[in-house]
Amino acid sequence: MTLEIAPEMTIKLTIEQILSRYAAGERSFRRSDLREVDLHNANLQGVNFNQTDLRQARLGKTDFSHASFREADLSEAILWGTDLHEADLYRAVLRETDLSGARLSYAKLEHSNLSRAILGGANLVHARLLRANLFEADLRPTSDQVTDLGQALLSQADLCYAKLSGAMLYQTQLDGARLCRAYLNRTLQQGMRPTDLSEASLQGADLSYADLTGAILHKANLRNADLTGAVLTDVEWQGAIMPDGTVHE
């Protein structure tokens, strides 16, 4: 279900009001109306924007570490290079949001909506994305930064049609995740790094018709995974537990 914030329940604030009140020690601005605000390079660590309307906001390189955006709407917002380390984005709407190069390590993103979001070069190490919606999300590396999902929790997340080519998924938890028709291939681009799923857990995952060309699956656990129609050309399987429980030599 998509969250909708009732307009009559929000408080219209300006960036100047936010910054001055934050400087005075205030941290809670929940249910604010901050649509289309322009804020760059600010320090708003630990701010509370729960249930806030931030649609199409421009928040590049702002420090939101330890901030709370529970059930906030950040659809189509620009958050490139933004620091969201240990931020709480539970049930946040980040549909078509630009998070390229963002720091999301240890962020809480359970049940969030990241459909068609841009996450190229983002740091999602240890991020919690259980049951998150990443349908058609773009997680390919940028020209200078790898997208790192190492040890992230993506169990039962929806990654159908997601672009994961070249992403780091080392020890990522993807049990029961939906990866149907996802792109995890090396692609034909010269020098493109392979998608690294070494030691990832994919038990019961739906990888039907996914493109895994050239992916690294060393010691990955694919027990009971659905590989129907998947493209498995040049996959590196050493030590992987296959869907039938056998270990690949």
Image (cartoon, rainbow, N blue to C red):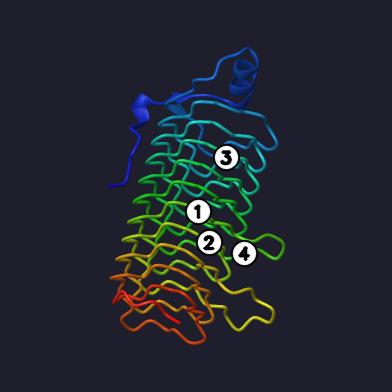
* First of labels 1, 2 by sequence position: 1
- Residue designated by label 1: 151
Residues at circles 1 and 2 in contact by the CB criterion of under 8 Å: yes
* First of labels 3, 4 by sequence position: 3
Q: Residues within 10 Å of mark 1 (few under 14, many from 20)?
A: many
Indicate which disc residue 84 carries. 3
Q: How far separated are the C-alphas under marks 3 and 1?
A: 17 Å
Position of 161 with respect to 149 (left or right) is left
Position of 193 with respect to 210 (left or right) is right
- Residue designated by label 4: 141
- Residue designated by label 2: 170
Q: How far separated are the C-alphas under marks 2 and 3?
A: 21 Å
Residue 100 position by quadrant: bottom right
* First of labels 4, 2 by sequence position: 4
Q: Residues within 10 Å of mark 2 (few under 14, many from 20)?
A: many
Q: How far separated are the C-alphas under marks 4 and 2?
A: 15 Å
Q: Nearer the viewer, mark 2 or mark 3?
A: 2
